[in-house]
Amino acid sequence: NVFKEGLAKTRTALVERVEELITRRKKIDEEFYEELEEILISADVGVNTVMDLIEDLRAEVKKRKIEEAAQLQPVLSEKLIGLLGADDNNSLRMAESGITVILFVGVNGVGKTTTIGKLAHRFKSEGKSVLLAAGDTFRAGAIEQLEVWGQRVGVDVIRQQSGSDPAAVMFDAVQAAKQRKVDVLLCDTAGRLQNKNNLMDELNKIFRVIQREIPSAPHEVLLVLDANTGQNALSQAKLFGEKSGVTGLVLTKLDSTAKGGIVIAIRHELSLPVKFVGLGEKMEDLQQFDSEQFVHALFA
Ligand code: GDP
């Protein structure tokens, strides 16, 4: 199971504590539910999600006449798979023919550049040609960082000077992608959040430029979120998800956090699919999300 190693910290914070609770309390009573609630909340599953989950569990326990805590484990796994898998749609939408354009949005430091590099590597190893667009012209070092990834993976980066208009970079990048007949164009964007409206205007402009050149594009707008930020990731998803035409999520740094429960909260509270998860800093450390495997990695 590809998720197992990456989820070790979440497993300790969530699953091992649930297991300990089950062994210690044995019977399902009010105290049991209270403790379970506390464990789930502290693993960043999110209060709303936890409340719904516990309510669901209570109903199921009643229906199936379960008394022993040990019998609850499979029911809990089942419920979690249900929560995570609702309308599971983890594959990327690709262009029917021609260039597939994928736009990456998200605040600074969440792992956007790294994710673009990893995805470029993934496409390349599937035999596809890839081009990167350095659309974050705002953050110092962002362009160079993307170039480092380009070199590492062996793909070209279309760039302009720092501070230039990101929409102009996108225009260049689409032209270059057309000329070179590449399969996939991956576009970085700026992630400053100090001025939300400016950022949204900028994203809209980028959208329009891309759409004018390729009417079916962008084929995906992936919002990158850092799992380490827990509930903050959820608020970012709500904020961006409403406005910038986000079609899917990438949750990074699951390997370095015990807050993996945030995936459950995000799936429960938003209708956006989780497409990929980041499980490390290397180019291979990006996995397509799979709810069943995810839960099995935690509970198996
Ligand atoms: P950006 O500002 O959103 O482009 O973020 P970066 O791509 O520069 O990533 C910020 C930091 O997070 C870097 O040190 C990355 O190596 C690290 N990072 C990104 N993704 C992951 C991940 O999945 N796991 C771990 N452990 N680190 C990651």
Image (spheres, grey):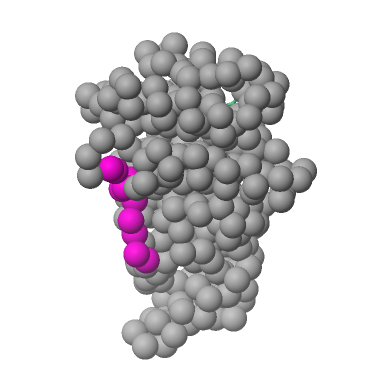
Tell me residue 1's x, y (percent): 30, 41
User: Over which residues does the magenta segment extend?
Assistant: 86-95
**145 vs 274: above or below:** above
User: In the drawing, does residue 125 fall left or right of residue 83?
Assistant: left
Q: Residue at x 46, y 77 (%)?
A: 57
Residue 114 image offset from top left, x and y in percent = 51, 27
- Residue 29, placed above or below residue 267: below
Residue at figure coordinates x 37%, y 13% from the top left: 154
Task: Using the rendered image of the protein, determine whether residue 252 is visible from the camera's viewpoint.
Answer: no
Q: Quadrant of residue 85?
A: bottom left
Q: Main secondary structure of the magenta part?
A: loop
Residue 298's x, y, as percent? Answer: 41, 50
Q: Is residue 251 left or right of residue 239?
A: left
- Which residue is farthest front? 212
190 w.r.t. 13: above or below? above
Relative to the observer, which residue lies in front, 57 or 276? 276
**Closer to the camera, 146 or 81?**
146
